[in-house]
Amino acid sequence: MSDAVEEAEARAVEPVGAKQRDAFISYSQSKNAPLAKQLQRGLERLAVSRFRPMRMSVFRDVTSLPANHDLWQSIQRELARSRYFILLASPEAAASPWVAREVDYWLRERDTEHLLIAVASGEIVWDDRAGDFDWRKTTSLPRNLAGHFTAAPLWVDLREIGERSHHSMRYPPFRAAVATLASPLHGRPKEELEHDDFRQLRFVKRLSWSGVALLVALLVLAVYGFFDASRQREAALSQARTSASQALAARSGQLLGTSPNQAAQYALYAEETRSTPESRRALAQAVTAAPYARRRLRADADSVTDMQGASRPAATDVVLSGDGTTAAYRSVFDDDRAVRLYDVPSARQSRVVRAEGTPRALSRDGRVLAMEVYLNRVQLWDTRSGRLLSTMATGHTENLPHVGHGLHALALSPDGRWVAASHYTPEGEAFAVVWRASDGREITRVPVSDARVGLGFSADGSRLTLVDQDRREVREFRTDSARWEAARSLPGMPGSTAEALRYSEVLLFDGARKALTRTSERAEVWDLEQRRRIAVRSLGPYEDMTVADDKGIFLLGGQDGTVRLYDAALRPGTTLGRLTRPASTIAMSADGTQVVVASYGGELNLFTTGVRRGQQVAFDEKDFTFGDLTPDGRMAVHRSEGRTEFWDPATGRRLGVIPYANLSVNLEDTAYTLSGDKRYVGMQSVEGFEDEGRFDVWDLRTGRRTDCGTAVGGSSFSPIRRPGLSFLPGDRYVVGEWNGAVELLDTRTCTRSTVTEDSGRFALSGDRRTLVLLNDDGVDTWRWDGDHAFARAARTTLPSEAHPVDMSVDHEGRQAAFSDRESHVYVVRLDSGERVRATGYLPDKTDAVAFSRDGRLLFQGFMTESTRGVRVLDAGSGDQLDIWTTDPPTGSVQPNEGMQVVPGPADDILTLGPDHKVVRRTVGVGAWHDLLCGLVSQPLPARERDRYLKDLDVEDPCR
């Protein structure tokens, strides 16, 4: 049953002694229930405060049950309690027996003065002559009202309201009708009731709006509080990230000297947590601390305790081909327990060879792998196909004591055609054996004093040299005739020792014409042709030692994990890096440029002994001088008598040559620019001390001038010596400093137009769309419209104390850098004019300046009295991140030769120093990130992560 029915039933059972009601509404429940309900509510709430109890009590029967004695008694009680009877007249009410019965009761017990009529529908017509309703026309009243009124009663017309269903007190006609009916109930005039109701309504509205305003204010405060809390939380999180990044960067700096790999790991996490000047400095210093490290191919094992033996540490072995292209690796810590082959140039695994045993040697081209297999056998494998080629056995393994297990010396000829090894027999005798690789057949066998002999082939494989320390003699085997030559004595050579094999192995190099003998504390170099000692050196604790066959330089793996070079005289040289555990096995290419190192924990690293922090661009071994690199880094220019060659630093190849050269050493006399398609070169040249020069466009394919050439005035004086000159996007236009102005040359029509008559030096962004002009008045920024003109975009100034000697614009044209005579660097944000001045070490003299590709780093060439180098600066803060010095020894530095720095291909920069070589250096935060991830890809240990990054969501930087 509905709530309305429940309400009526509750009222019906009220006790007889309940308080009096003000009105009783009689109506047709089938037709007028909604209107009756709103009428009741209006009568009870009219002119009553919404926050006070209702003063009027109006009864409305909501029961629709059939008539019965109990229900009628309840209605009678309500009628008896009511002061007024309100008839909601309608044809349906007139026909309702309940309404008629209620009217009968009221007329019998009360009077018509307290009977009010509200017409909901139908018609009411009063007949003045009859003094009664016109019952022929009246349809909305019950007939039992006939004859009870002596005059026309006042009724309220609700017909329009009922038709439109506007039953709300907010509807003025309905409110007026309710006020008319309520006036006698309250005993007050209708106007006074309406006035009070309006006043209450205005109060409620004001209160409602106040409530809304309060809610809005509270909502605003809540939203503000939420965002303020979020802002504070973000600020706190940002500060926590910054602090954690700075702490990680500081820890990286502490580890640089003792553990470069760990330093790199902390630097990577510092940059991943929050990029700050400190994190970028940590990256730069980590790269500097491991200048020769190329990539970590295998990580170190978490624990080696279970794999260690009583007599020797767990085995990890690696060999490298003579040409430095192929490495073979095997470790007991590798779950696969196979031999992994790596392509060294790409630093990627190339194949897995399913072979049992230990890799011992590779042919010079890396195509043949020699494996030592149990028991005293040699297998040769094709590294390209992974196929077994042949197997060779010593044939003396029955009843062989454990001490005799293993091949001591093993050599593979550079061409992979011959194999030699030394071994013990069950009787304790030692032999050196030579096999032919093609069929595995034994060619010769010769007794030796001990299996710890030296074996090595000549570069062409025609000669095998055997060094017998205990006999102090050297013998040679000719592979073409399969004959041993007579032994020659080596007076003074020390005999073999009982130390571990890694301390007693004899290494042959220089085509097997020289030998290295050693103990755990001492090493000697012997010239086998002259049969004399040429170098001797005491060694510190080490694990392994190898030699570059062609160069005669040595590499030593220390017990502390250090990997260090020694020269031909055994003098210690460069430290290439440091491993987590002792460097157990090391190998080096024949030319000494590539190095692979394995640790006892299975770690495998690639190093290079070449140019630090970069790669020398060969350019056919040509030398270059300061200024031979174009400012945009797209060309290297080599001038000789009567010809000029143009080289591409990206490929190291020659672009073309022209039959002309200006050999002037003054940078202001010449300038060059390369077209985007690298087909044409523009050259501006002033001969000698003449006032005028020429600009010509040359076709590099033919080596001839094009038709577009023009005379130009000499460049105005400027501390920045190199005049501006550049092709623009599309290669149709060339912009240059000509005739005391900045001019634009259309190479199709060979006509010139003026960009600005202001004289000065300019530089272009890497994308060649932004031109920055420096003159006495300040710094002007011009933007290329992509069609045929420049438009001035901004203007700013440099400090009065600035005296620029070089300038550079970043790749996207957002900022420019000016290298100062006093060694400062000013970075200018071109749109805002904001300036940053670099801090840190100030060298004696600075030269060129260049941005990294991403614009976050800045590089400034410098020179002092004894050295040359590059300052690494943070373009955002001006902080100095690092200093790189040139590779040549300081004694080779030539006076007045500076360090040229220009942007390079991709993310690199190019440097040209006093060694007259162009070096391509990988720079930039992203590039350093990738480089260091190649060295330390494993995540930070859990305890260290909790220490620095607790409650911070920081992902693995090398994910």
Image: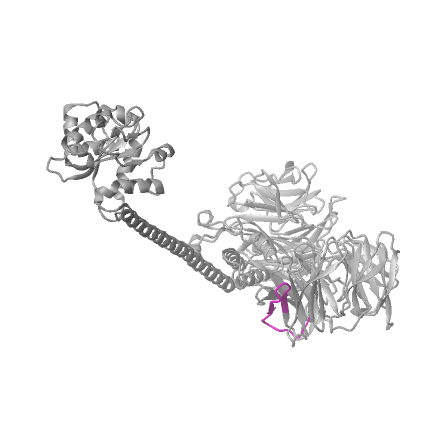
Q: Establish if 305 lies above or below 635.
A: above
What residue span does the magenta drawing correspond to?
A: 826-847
> Horizontal and vertical percent for residue 689?
86, 73
Asked if the magenta segment contains residue 566, the reply would be no
Of 485 and 926, which appears nearest the observer? 926
What residue is rendered at 74% in x and 52% in y?
A: 651
Picture quarter with the N terminus: top left
Can residue 445 be seen at all in this image of the molecule?
Answer: no
> Horizontal and vertical percent for residue 661?
86, 63
* Image quadrant in which you'd find residue 731: bottom right
> Horizontal and vertical percent for residue 743?
79, 63
Q: Residue furthest left?
A: 17
Q: Establish if 421 lies above or below 148.
A: below
* Image quadrant in which you'd find residue 424: top right
* Image quadrant in which you'd find residue 738: bottom right
Of 753 and 871, which appears nearest the observer? 753
